[in-house]
Amino acid sequence: MTRNIAALITAAAVITILVITAAFLDWRFWYRWHTLPENAGEWPASYYQPVVEVTGDKQPFFPLADANNASIESEALNAAAVWAEAHNSAALIVLHRGVVQLERYWQDIQADSLFSGRAMTRSFISPLIAKAIQEGSINSVDDPVALYLPEWGDDPRGQITIRNLLHNLSGLENPMLAGDPDPDNKNTRLALGGDFRAAALRFDLANQPGEFFALSNANAQLLGAVLESATGEEYESYFNTRLWQPLGAGPSYLYTDSENGMPAVYCCFRATPRDWLRYGAALLNDGRVGEKQLWPKGWVDEMTTPSQFSPNYGYQIWVGNPDPSLGRIYVQGGDLVAPHGEPIASEGVFFLEGGGYRTMYVLPEHELVILRLGYYDANWKTSTLPNLILPGLRKIDNAVEPEEITE
Protein backbone atom coordinates (compact mmCIF):
# COMPACT_ATOMS: atom_id res chain seq x y z
CA MET A 1 0.00 0.00 0.00
CA THR A 2 2.77 2.38 0.98
CA ARG A 3 4.64 1.52 -2.22
CA ASN A 4 1.53 2.27 -4.32
CA ILE A 5 1.04 5.63 -2.65
CA ALA A 6 4.71 6.43 -3.14
CA ALA A 7 4.48 5.39 -6.79
CA LEU A 8 1.41 7.59 -7.32
CA ILE A 9 3.12 10.54 -5.67
CA THR A 10 6.20 9.99 -7.82
CA ALA A 11 4.10 9.73 -10.99
CA ALA A 12 2.18 12.87 -10.09
CA ALA A 13 5.43 14.69 -9.43
CA VAL A 14 6.87 13.59 -12.76
CA ILE A 15 3.72 14.69 -14.61
CA THR A 16 3.78 18.03 -12.83
CA ILE A 17 7.41 18.55 -13.71
CA LEU A 18 6.73 17.66 -17.35
CA VAL A 19 3.78 20.05 -17.54
CA ILE A 20 5.76 22.87 -15.93
CA THR A 21 8.73 22.17 -18.21
CA ALA A 22 6.53 22.18 -21.31
CA ALA A 23 4.91 25.42 -20.22
CA PHE A 24 8.29 26.98 -19.46
CA LEU A 25 9.67 25.96 -22.85
CA ASP A 26 6.92 28.03 -24.50
CA TRP A 27 6.03 30.32 -21.64
CA ARG A 28 5.37 33.20 -24.03
CA PHE A 29 2.56 31.27 -25.69
CA TRP A 30 0.89 30.51 -22.36
CA TYR A 31 1.23 34.11 -21.25
CA ARG A 32 -0.32 35.38 -24.47
CA TRP A 33 -3.05 32.76 -24.42
CA HIS A 34 -4.07 33.47 -20.83
CA THR A 35 -4.11 37.23 -21.39
CA LEU A 36 -5.99 37.33 -24.70
CA PRO A 37 -7.97 40.57 -25.05
CA GLU A 38 -11.73 40.11 -25.16
CA ASN A 39 -12.00 41.57 -28.66
CA ALA A 40 -10.00 39.09 -30.72
CA GLY A 41 -10.69 41.19 -33.82
CA GLU A 42 -8.71 44.20 -32.63
CA TRP A 43 -5.98 43.43 -30.13
CA PRO A 44 -4.10 46.53 -28.98
CA ALA A 45 -0.66 47.21 -30.42
CA SER A 46 0.81 46.63 -26.96
CA TYR A 47 -0.26 42.99 -27.22
CA TYR A 48 1.99 42.33 -30.21
CA GLN A 49 5.22 42.13 -28.25
CA PRO A 50 8.11 41.73 -28.59
CA VAL A 51 8.90 43.53 -31.83
CA VAL A 52 11.90 44.17 -34.02
CA GLU A 53 12.43 47.56 -35.61
CA VAL A 54 12.71 47.89 -39.36
CA THR A 55 14.71 51.08 -39.62
CA GLY A 56 13.96 52.05 -43.21
CA ASP A 57 15.42 55.20 -44.76
CA LYS A 58 12.76 57.87 -44.56
CA GLN A 59 12.50 60.07 -47.66
CA PRO A 60 10.15 62.93 -48.64
CA PHE A 61 6.53 61.92 -49.22
CA PHE A 62 4.59 62.32 -52.44
CA PRO A 63 3.52 65.88 -53.34
CA LEU A 64 0.05 66.99 -52.22
CA ALA A 65 -2.46 68.19 -54.79
CA ASP A 66 -3.40 71.83 -55.14
CA ALA A 67 -5.43 73.68 -57.73
CA ASN A 68 -2.72 73.06 -60.34
CA ASN A 69 -2.41 69.30 -60.02
CA ALA A 70 -5.74 68.06 -58.70
CA SER A 71 -6.79 65.21 -60.96
CA ILE A 72 -9.89 63.92 -59.14
CA GLU A 73 -12.95 66.08 -58.61
CA SER A 74 -13.49 67.16 -55.03
CA GLU A 75 -17.07 65.89 -54.96
CA ALA A 76 -15.90 62.32 -55.53
CA LEU A 77 -13.12 62.59 -52.96
CA ASN A 78 -15.44 64.10 -50.36
CA ALA A 79 -18.01 61.36 -50.94
CA ALA A 80 -15.32 58.73 -50.38
CA ALA A 81 -14.13 60.47 -47.21
CA VAL A 82 -17.67 60.74 -45.82
CA TRP A 83 -18.29 57.05 -46.48
CA ALA A 84 -14.94 56.04 -45.00
CA GLU A 85 -15.50 58.04 -41.82
CA ALA A 86 -19.00 56.60 -41.43
CA HIS A 87 -17.59 53.06 -41.72
CA ASN A 88 -15.07 53.09 -38.88
CA SER A 89 -12.00 54.22 -40.81
CA ALA A 90 -8.86 55.70 -39.30
CA ALA A 91 -7.02 56.81 -42.46
CA LEU A 92 -7.80 57.37 -46.12
CA ILE A 93 -5.17 58.38 -48.68
CA VAL A 94 -5.75 58.63 -52.43
CA LEU A 95 -2.73 58.79 -54.77
CA HIS A 96 -3.23 59.51 -58.47
CA ARG A 97 -0.34 59.72 -60.89
CA GLY A 98 2.13 60.27 -58.09
CA VAL A 99 0.21 63.11 -56.41
CA VAL A 100 -1.79 62.75 -53.18
CA GLN A 101 -5.31 63.91 -53.97
CA LEU A 102 -6.79 63.25 -50.52
CA GLU A 103 -5.37 62.53 -47.07
CA ARG A 104 -7.76 62.23 -44.11
CA TYR A 105 -7.39 60.83 -40.59
CA TRP A 106 -9.81 59.97 -37.79
CA GLN A 107 -9.85 58.27 -34.39
CA ASP A 108 -6.63 59.83 -33.07
CA ILE A 109 -4.60 58.53 -36.04
CA GLN A 110 -2.23 60.90 -37.83
CA ALA A 111 0.17 60.71 -40.77
CA ASP A 112 3.00 59.62 -38.46
CA SER A 113 0.97 57.12 -36.38
CA LEU A 114 1.96 53.46 -36.57
CA PHE A 115 -0.92 51.27 -37.67
CA SER A 116 -1.04 47.49 -38.02
CA GLY A 117 -1.85 46.22 -41.47
CA ARG A 118 -2.67 42.79 -40.05
CA ALA A 119 -2.95 40.39 -43.01
CA MET A 120 -1.85 43.08 -45.47
CA THR A 121 1.59 42.19 -44.08
CA ARG A 122 1.80 38.91 -45.99
CA SER A 123 1.87 40.67 -49.36
CA PHE A 124 5.49 41.74 -48.72
CA ILE A 125 6.80 38.19 -49.03
CA SER A 126 6.11 37.86 -52.76
CA PRO A 127 8.47 40.66 -53.93
CA LEU A 128 11.07 39.40 -51.47
CA ILE A 129 10.90 35.92 -53.03
CA ALA A 130 11.30 37.57 -56.45
CA LYS A 131 14.35 39.43 -55.19
CA ALA A 132 15.87 36.23 -53.81
CA ILE A 133 15.37 34.57 -57.21
CA GLN A 134 17.00 37.55 -58.92
CA GLU A 135 19.97 37.32 -56.55
CA GLY A 136 20.32 33.58 -57.09
CA SER A 137 19.44 32.48 -53.55
CA ILE A 138 16.31 30.71 -54.83
CA ASN A 139 16.20 28.92 -58.15
CA SER A 140 12.54 29.23 -59.04
CA VAL A 141 9.03 29.48 -57.58
CA ASP A 142 8.66 25.87 -58.70
CA ASP A 143 11.34 24.67 -56.31
CA PRO A 144 10.09 22.13 -53.75
CA VAL A 145 10.40 23.61 -50.27
CA ALA A 146 12.45 20.59 -49.14
CA LEU A 147 15.40 22.37 -50.79
CA TYR A 148 15.16 25.05 -48.10
CA LEU A 149 13.37 23.39 -45.19
CA PRO A 150 15.55 20.50 -43.97
CA GLU A 151 12.85 19.52 -41.48
CA TRP A 152 10.77 18.33 -44.45
CA GLY A 153 13.64 16.77 -46.41
CA ASP A 154 12.16 13.24 -46.30
CA ASP A 155 8.56 14.31 -45.77
CA PRO A 156 5.76 14.43 -48.39
CA ARG A 157 5.25 18.07 -47.39
CA GLY A 158 8.69 18.79 -48.78
CA GLN A 159 7.24 18.47 -52.30
CA ILE A 160 5.06 21.53 -51.79
CA THR A 161 6.47 24.22 -54.08
CA ILE A 162 7.14 27.86 -53.37
CA ARG A 163 4.48 28.67 -55.95
CA ASN A 164 1.99 26.54 -54.02
CA LEU A 165 2.70 28.53 -50.87
CA LEU A 166 2.41 31.84 -52.71
CA HIS A 167 -0.95 30.83 -54.19
CA ASN A 168 -2.20 29.30 -50.91
CA LEU A 169 -2.37 25.92 -52.64
CA SER A 170 -0.07 24.10 -50.24
CA GLY A 171 -2.67 21.47 -49.33
CA LEU A 172 -1.85 21.95 -45.65
CA GLU A 173 -4.66 21.73 -43.13
CA ASN A 174 -6.40 24.99 -42.44
CA PRO A 175 -7.56 25.70 -38.88
CA MET A 176 -7.14 29.42 -39.58
CA LEU A 177 -10.79 30.38 -39.70
CA ALA A 178 -12.18 27.94 -37.16
CA GLY A 179 -12.14 30.42 -34.28
CA ASP A 180 -10.99 27.63 -31.99
CA PRO A 181 -9.76 28.84 -28.57
CA ASP A 182 -8.15 25.46 -27.89
CA PRO A 183 -4.47 26.04 -27.05
CA ASP A 184 -3.61 22.99 -29.15
CA ASN A 185 -5.14 24.56 -32.25
CA LYS A 186 -2.20 24.84 -34.65
CA ASN A 187 -3.06 28.31 -35.86
CA THR A 188 -3.40 29.51 -32.28
CA ARG A 189 0.10 28.19 -31.66
CA LEU A 190 1.34 29.98 -34.77
CA ALA A 191 -0.30 33.26 -33.75
CA LEU A 192 0.76 33.27 -30.10
CA GLY A 193 3.69 30.90 -29.69
CA GLY A 194 7.35 31.41 -29.06
CA ASP A 195 8.58 29.76 -32.27
CA PHE A 196 6.74 30.76 -35.44
CA ARG A 197 8.85 28.57 -37.72
CA ALA A 198 8.31 25.41 -35.65
CA ALA A 199 4.60 26.17 -35.36
CA ALA A 200 4.21 26.54 -39.15
CA LEU A 201 6.11 23.28 -39.73
CA ARG A 202 3.57 21.41 -37.57
CA PHE A 203 0.78 21.77 -40.14
CA ASP A 204 -0.08 18.45 -41.83
CA LEU A 205 -1.20 17.76 -45.37
CA ALA A 206 -4.97 17.64 -45.82
CA ASN A 207 -5.19 17.97 -49.62
CA GLN A 208 -3.05 17.41 -52.68
CA PRO A 209 -0.58 20.32 -53.04
CA GLY A 210 -1.42 22.58 -55.95
CA GLU A 211 -5.07 21.58 -56.11
CA PHE A 212 -6.90 23.17 -53.18
CA PHE A 213 -7.13 26.85 -52.22
CA ALA A 214 -7.15 27.79 -48.53
CA LEU A 215 -5.98 31.14 -47.23
CA SER A 216 -3.57 30.23 -44.44
CA ASN A 217 -1.21 32.00 -42.06
CA ALA A 218 1.07 28.97 -42.20
CA ASN A 219 1.72 29.37 -45.93
CA ALA A 220 3.05 32.91 -45.52
CA GLN A 221 5.13 31.99 -42.48
CA LEU A 222 6.66 29.04 -44.32
CA LEU A 223 7.62 31.37 -47.17
CA GLY A 224 9.47 33.47 -44.61
CA ALA A 225 11.25 30.36 -43.37
CA VAL A 226 12.19 29.46 -46.95
CA LEU A 227 13.52 32.98 -47.51
CA GLU A 228 15.65 32.89 -44.36
CA SER A 229 17.10 29.48 -45.19
CA ALA A 230 17.77 30.35 -48.82
CA THR A 231 19.42 33.71 -48.21
CA GLY A 232 21.07 33.03 -44.87
CA GLU A 233 19.66 36.36 -43.64
CA GLU A 234 17.12 37.09 -40.96
CA TYR A 235 13.75 38.03 -42.43
CA GLU A 236 13.71 41.52 -40.91
CA SER A 237 17.15 42.33 -42.37
CA TYR A 238 16.26 41.11 -45.85
CA PHE A 239 12.94 42.94 -45.74
CA ASN A 240 14.61 46.16 -44.63
CA THR A 241 17.49 46.22 -47.11
CA ARG A 242 15.67 44.88 -50.19
CA LEU A 243 12.31 46.57 -49.77
CA TRP A 244 11.65 48.98 -46.91
CA GLN A 245 14.76 51.17 -47.20
CA PRO A 246 14.57 51.40 -51.02
CA LEU A 247 10.90 52.43 -50.68
CA GLY A 248 12.04 55.46 -48.70
CA ALA A 249 9.89 54.38 -45.77
CA GLY A 250 10.62 55.20 -42.15
CA PRO A 251 10.98 53.18 -38.92
CA SER A 252 8.37 50.45 -38.52
CA TYR A 253 7.92 47.26 -36.50
CA LEU A 254 7.50 43.54 -37.08
CA TYR A 255 5.88 41.35 -34.42
CA THR A 256 8.23 38.54 -33.34
CA ASP A 257 7.79 35.20 -31.61
CA SER A 258 10.42 36.02 -28.97
CA GLU A 259 13.28 38.39 -28.22
CA ASN A 260 15.67 38.14 -31.20
CA GLY A 261 13.25 35.61 -32.69
CA MET A 262 11.53 35.25 -36.07
CA PRO A 263 9.02 37.90 -37.15
CA ALA A 264 5.45 37.11 -38.12
CA VAL A 265 5.43 37.11 -41.92
CA TYR A 266 1.66 36.68 -42.15
CA CYS A 267 0.48 39.53 -39.92
CA CYS A 268 0.73 42.59 -37.78
CA PHE A 269 3.45 44.77 -39.34
CA ARG A 270 3.07 48.32 -38.01
CA ALA A 271 3.92 51.28 -40.21
CA THR A 272 2.59 54.78 -40.80
CA PRO A 273 -0.27 55.23 -43.30
CA ARG A 274 2.08 57.16 -45.57
CA ASP A 275 4.63 54.35 -45.57
CA TRP A 276 1.96 51.77 -46.33
CA LEU A 277 1.02 53.91 -49.33
CA ARG A 278 4.62 53.92 -50.57
CA TYR A 279 4.39 50.17 -51.01
CA GLY A 280 1.15 50.49 -52.97
CA ALA A 281 2.81 53.03 -55.27
CA ALA A 282 5.72 50.63 -55.84
CA LEU A 283 3.27 47.87 -56.76
CA LEU A 284 1.52 50.24 -59.17
CA ASN A 285 4.86 50.89 -60.88
CA ASP A 286 6.02 47.26 -60.91
CA GLY A 287 8.74 47.92 -58.37
CA ARG A 288 10.03 51.17 -59.83
CA VAL A 289 10.75 53.85 -57.21
CA GLY A 290 12.54 56.89 -58.62
CA GLU A 291 15.61 55.50 -60.37
CA LYS A 292 15.52 52.20 -58.49
CA GLN A 293 13.97 48.92 -59.62
CA LEU A 294 13.15 47.11 -56.36
CA TRP A 295 12.29 43.73 -57.90
CA PRO A 296 12.39 42.20 -61.41
CA LYS A 297 10.21 43.87 -64.02
CA GLY A 298 7.06 41.91 -64.80
CA TRP A 299 6.83 40.44 -61.31
CA VAL A 300 3.61 42.28 -60.43
CA ASP A 301 1.94 40.74 -63.49
CA GLU A 302 2.97 37.30 -62.26
CA MET A 303 2.10 38.18 -58.68
CA THR A 304 -1.42 39.21 -59.69
CA THR A 305 -2.15 36.22 -61.91
CA PRO A 306 -4.56 33.92 -60.05
CA SER A 307 -4.51 30.15 -60.03
CA GLN A 308 -7.29 28.07 -61.55
CA PHE A 309 -8.42 27.13 -58.05
CA SER A 310 -9.01 30.70 -56.87
CA PRO A 311 -9.80 33.31 -59.54
CA ASN A 312 -9.38 36.15 -57.03
CA TYR A 313 -6.03 35.33 -55.44
CA GLY A 314 -2.51 35.71 -56.78
CA TYR A 315 0.75 35.49 -54.86
CA GLN A 316 -0.38 36.46 -51.34
CA ILE A 317 -2.59 39.22 -52.77
CA TRP A 318 -6.23 39.59 -53.86
CA VAL A 319 -7.03 40.27 -57.52
CA GLY A 320 -10.03 41.33 -59.56
CA ASN A 321 -13.74 41.08 -58.91
CA PRO A 322 -15.41 37.87 -57.76
CA ASP A 323 -18.25 36.11 -59.50
CA PRO A 324 -21.32 37.74 -57.90
CA SER A 325 -22.94 34.33 -57.50
CA LEU A 326 -19.93 32.96 -55.57
CA GLY A 327 -18.30 35.91 -53.82
CA ARG A 328 -14.66 36.25 -52.81
CA ILE A 329 -13.98 33.07 -50.86
CA TYR A 330 -11.29 32.34 -48.27
CA VAL A 331 -11.36 28.55 -48.55
CA GLN A 332 -12.28 26.57 -51.64
CA GLY A 333 -15.77 25.14 -51.24
CA GLY A 334 -16.25 27.07 -48.00
CA ASP A 335 -19.02 29.46 -47.10
CA LEU A 336 -16.96 32.30 -45.63
CA VAL A 337 -17.12 35.09 -48.21
CA ALA A 338 -15.72 38.63 -48.17
CA PRO A 339 -18.36 41.41 -48.47
CA HIS A 340 -17.19 42.64 -51.86
CA GLY A 341 -20.24 44.51 -53.19
CA GLU A 342 -20.61 45.64 -56.81
CA PRO A 343 -17.67 45.02 -59.15
CA ILE A 344 -14.84 47.55 -58.92
CA ALA A 345 -15.10 49.52 -62.16
CA SER A 346 -11.48 49.18 -63.24
CA GLU A 347 -9.64 46.53 -65.23
CA GLY A 348 -6.75 44.77 -63.53
CA VAL A 349 -7.47 45.97 -59.99
CA PHE A 350 -5.70 44.16 -57.16
CA PHE A 351 -5.54 44.83 -53.44
CA LEU A 352 -4.06 44.02 -50.07
CA GLU A 353 -6.59 43.18 -47.39
CA GLY A 354 -6.23 42.75 -43.63
CA GLY A 355 -8.51 42.19 -40.67
CA GLY A 356 -10.96 44.99 -39.95
CA TYR A 357 -11.10 45.60 -43.72
CA ARG A 358 -7.77 47.37 -43.90
CA THR A 359 -7.43 47.62 -47.66
CA MET A 360 -4.96 49.06 -50.15
CA TYR A 361 -6.29 49.11 -53.70
CA VAL A 362 -4.04 49.35 -56.74
CA LEU A 363 -5.76 50.27 -60.03
CA PRO A 364 -3.12 50.22 -62.80
CA GLU A 365 -5.62 51.22 -65.49
CA HIS A 366 -6.02 54.60 -63.80
CA GLU A 367 -2.59 54.98 -62.12
CA LEU A 368 -4.44 55.07 -58.82
CA VAL A 369 -3.71 53.81 -55.30
CA ILE A 370 -6.25 54.02 -52.47
CA LEU A 371 -5.38 53.19 -48.87
CA ARG A 372 -8.03 52.67 -46.20
CA LEU A 373 -6.88 51.80 -42.70
CA GLY A 374 -9.44 51.24 -39.98
CA TYR A 375 -11.51 48.75 -38.07
CA TYR A 376 -14.34 46.32 -38.61
CA ASP A 377 -17.68 47.65 -39.82
CA ALA A 378 -20.70 45.42 -40.35
CA ASN A 379 -21.76 47.36 -43.46
CA TRP A 380 -18.38 47.34 -45.18
CA LYS A 381 -18.22 46.61 -48.92
CA THR A 382 -14.82 46.24 -50.57
CA SER A 383 -15.79 47.95 -53.82
CA THR A 384 -17.48 51.07 -52.43
CA LEU A 385 -14.47 53.36 -51.96
CA PRO A 386 -12.90 52.91 -55.41
CA ASN A 387 -16.31 53.13 -57.05
CA LEU A 388 -16.99 56.44 -55.31
CA ILE A 389 -13.66 57.87 -56.47
CA LEU A 390 -13.48 56.59 -60.05
CA PRO A 391 -16.31 58.72 -61.53
CA GLY A 392 -14.56 61.89 -60.40
CA LEU A 393 -11.33 60.73 -61.99
CA ARG A 394 -12.79 59.66 -65.32
CA LYS A 395 -14.21 63.10 -66.15
CA ILE A 396 -10.81 64.81 -66.20
CA ASP A 397 -8.42 61.85 -66.47
CA ASN A 398 -7.14 62.81 -69.90
CA ALA A 399 -6.68 66.48 -69.06
CA VAL A 400 -3.92 66.00 -66.49
CA GLU A 401 -0.37 65.12 -67.38
CA PRO A 402 1.18 62.30 -65.30
CA GLU A 403 3.37 63.45 -62.41
CA GLU A 404 6.70 61.81 -61.72
CA ILE A 405 6.62 59.81 -58.49
CA THR A 406 9.20 60.98 -55.97
CA GLU A 407 11.14 58.70 -53.72
Image (cartoon, rainbow, N blue to C red):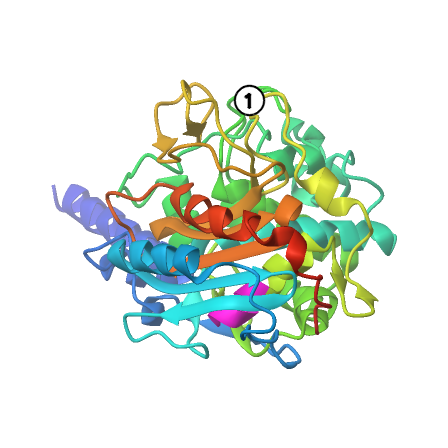
Residue 274 part of the magenta-drawn span: yes
When the figure is inspected, residue 169 is found, relative to residue 55, above or below; the finding is above
Main SS of the magenta part reads: helix
- Between 70 and 210, the residue placed more toward the observer is 70
Point out the stretch of residues depicted in magenta: 272-277
Q: Pinpoint residue 30: horizontal percent, then vertical percent.
A: 31, 58
Percent x, y for residue 57? 66, 80
Q: Position of residue 358 (x, y in %)?
A: 41, 54
**Identity of the residue drawn at 64% across and 77% down:** 56
Residue 119 vs residue 322, the one in the foreground: 322
Q: Is residue 92 a member of the stretch shown in magenta?
A: no
Q: Position of residue 279 (x, y in %)?
A: 61, 61
Task: Assign a secondary structure to mark 1.
Answer: loop
Quadrant location, the C terminus: bottom right
In the figure, residue 118 lies in which quadrant? Answer: bottom left
Residue 303 placement, left or right of 65: right
Residue denoted by label 1: 212
Q: From where the camera sits, is residue 262 visible?
A: no
